[in-house]
Amino acid sequence: MSSAGSEISDNLTTRTLSGISEVDTIRLGVDLVSATRKNIGFLRTVNESQWLHERPTILEAIRRYEELWMPLMSDLTVGAPPPMILPPVDIEWVWFCHSLHPVRYRQYCESRFSKLIGKPAIFDEENEEYALMRCREIWEHKYPSEPFENEVDSDSENPICVTNEDILDEVKRQRFLYLKFSEPYMCELVYLIAARQRYKGFLYILQIFSDGCSLFVPAFDIQLMWLTHLSYPTVYSEDLKDMWDDMGKVVGVWGNVKAKDVEETKKIWEKTFDLPYEKAGGGLALEFDGIASVKPPIFWNVSDTDVNSKYKSMLPRFLLEVCIFLKLKSGMKAMQQDIKCDFLRLRMVRCHRELKLGKPISNFSHNTWQKVWHLYCEFGTKGLILELRHPGGTCFKGSTLQGTVEFRWNNLLRAPSLTMEREIEQFRVVISITPPVQAQYLLKCVPDRVTDDSGAMISDVILRLNRYRPQEGRWLSRTVLDHAGRECFVVRIRVGGGIWRRGGETPSAVKWEDRIIEIREGFWSYVAGSIGRAPEKVVGTATPKEPTAECQAAWDFSTGDELMISWESSSSMSGLKFTLKNAASPDSLLVLLRGRKMQRQGRKQSEVEKEADEEDDEGFVTLVRFTDENPTGKATALLNWKLLVIELLPEEDAVLALLLCFSILRSVSEMRKEDVGSLLIRRRIKETKLGHRDWGSVILHPSSLSSSSSVTSPYIQPWYWNAKAVMAASTDNIRRPPAQNYSPAEGGDKLYKRGIIT
């Protein structure tokens, strides 16, 4: 920071962020919370409207904006505020992009209309519908020969003259703006209220330190508020009329800044408010010296609907982002020698009690806040515990506890700016979170006992309850568990028919076309220990069918989908190809991509189908849906058919994903003539006790992975980074039970090998 800035900062009285009033800073002339929620929804609509980004459409939109819309607004705002009307989406998009450059927009308006043209503040959906309808009426009266909607053919070869290159460049630049603000928590009211308060704090430091600092770098949440403020030009101009030149020092959304500029802004903020500048959901998303900031390790996507709410056995999973900062108390200029070896330990209240992240405290300072950890936690973890420990304990082993402090998520949600400060011995700790939002479902399938046609496990217990009536039919069974280890579904594969009698009859393999896959919703009804009956409600089936000339395997699903599988060679899975069809929904196309592609950008269907795969042998498949709303495709589920593990968005059907997993595994096992997915295991494997290290409950951000101990643990990383290790770590014994542990009544290995492999 410059010397002038440092001098002012050192003599400044510390303020509280929540204590800043409109007297201290500027008065905001628009409801930024409501306006930002509307803007995020609008940007999402623009992002999903592929037609809006075709060059002929953009050029026509700019023509309509310049020649029709702005003159119309100029006429309607003669001596009056902006009328309560909204333009068509193509014009609104151009208008939005144009307003993000306030200097050029002001010059444009004043040169053409001798005044600044503003935008009406309309946030209610009903009011938006009325405003759009009213605009159509005015438009059709003013321009009877011009269509209200943009009707240009995206494939049109008739060139449209570009009259304003500046506007065209700005529209192109903002093409992927939504992707910067697509995290689902950004529409949460509590997040936006906190962001507005921090934006006011940002304007406050800009007022005071503008002379002593060359650039101000906005944090992510502040940047979101600033863009919304910019999109209301007359309000922005009036609010910041005394800071117009100062705002030119704020780095734009696509800006490339130097690390020293970031440090200057951080220091000024910390000197002013005595709080970390960054926070959960409010990091720095710009490029530093040409290098983009680290991407989050999880795939968050806004889902309007949860199609799995119809399954009562499935409970939603909620995730929040957490940032932890540490600083020495004021006055402690240097570490005392006896505490330099102390370290900080992080533990969770629930779900991952085995987690113990350590951080040495020797490098902490009283001058600045230092980020200790950045992580993502399930709301079910309840909170976290920080411990200050000293090495050495009983017999010079372990460590002794010096102090502890606990943070609960519910308390943080009620805290100002979603931030809370506590003290632990000689340290100050600040923790911030984002509001919990629904995340992807996580499902895994574990082996279980063989069942009969009715769904009861093959057991002497069931035999006695049935008054020794023989159990008919043999089905391989798998129990589907969610992220918290709760039973959601039971998947059964029909293998044999008939009964077993001592010294007499034995079950025999059913015909190939009768080897169906069945999914039942719910949990086992246990009658004695681990012996029980499967739930009765069948929610999905997959039936094998005769393959066509184009494929080697085919399945009919009860969902109406048809899966066709082909391969080039039985010795390699690199040539696996999948085709999904649904005659009942021709407008909705499903594509299966080999590999992990949950974070893929939208691409044309032809490009998606040509994608090469680099991860076939790991068994990953990504499900992509093409709809009218998402013509470029949206990845909705990540499947590992080898390990029978699934991650899916709430908008994707869990039953369809399970049917896909088991159908692919069955077909590949038959193709390879081997038990690829350990389907021959017919006993529940002992699992790690729930709450010790629940998978997906805690995920470290990559920025914390390099600086924390215990980072080799696979279950504080995304599960798909090392899926085999995560699934193995969730069990205490992954060995296949010996054949002699299976009862003769279940049928021998030969029966199940014939039903799965041949």
Image (spheres, helix red, strand yellow):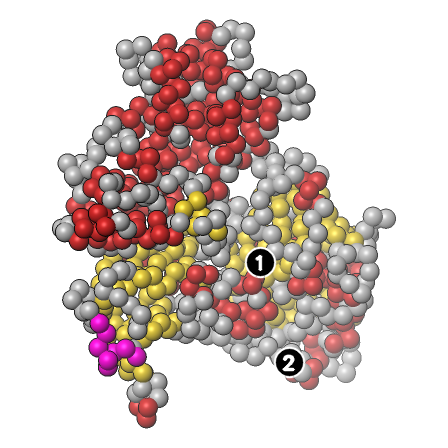
Q: Residue furthest bottom?
A: 395
> Which residue in the structure is indicated by mark 2?
737
Q: Going by the image, does 478 lie left or right of 171?
A: right
The location of residue 648, given as percent across then percent down, is 55, 53
Quarter of the image where one finds residue 406: bottom left
Residue 116 is one of the magenta-drawn residues: no
**Range of magenta residues:** 334-341
- Is the residue marked by circle 2 packed among few (<14), some (14-19), or many (20+) residues within 10 Å? some
Residue type, label 2: Pro
User: Which disc number belongs to residue 634?
Assistant: none
Tell me the SS state at disc 1. Answer: strand
Q: Nearer the viewer, mark 1 or mark 2?
A: 1
Q: Going by the image, does 361 lie left or right of 138?
A: left
User: Which disc number belongs to residue 646?
Assistant: 1
Q: Nearer the viewer, residue 8 or 17?
A: 8
Q: Residue furthest front?
A: 3
The location of residue 164, given as percent across then percent down, is 50, 21
Q: Residue furthest right?
A: 549
The location of residue 715, given as percent across then percent down, is 49, 68
Q: Nearer the viewer, residue 290 or 238?
A: 290
Give me the residue at 29% from left, 68% from top.
364
Q: Going by the image, does 475 lie left or right of 383?
A: right
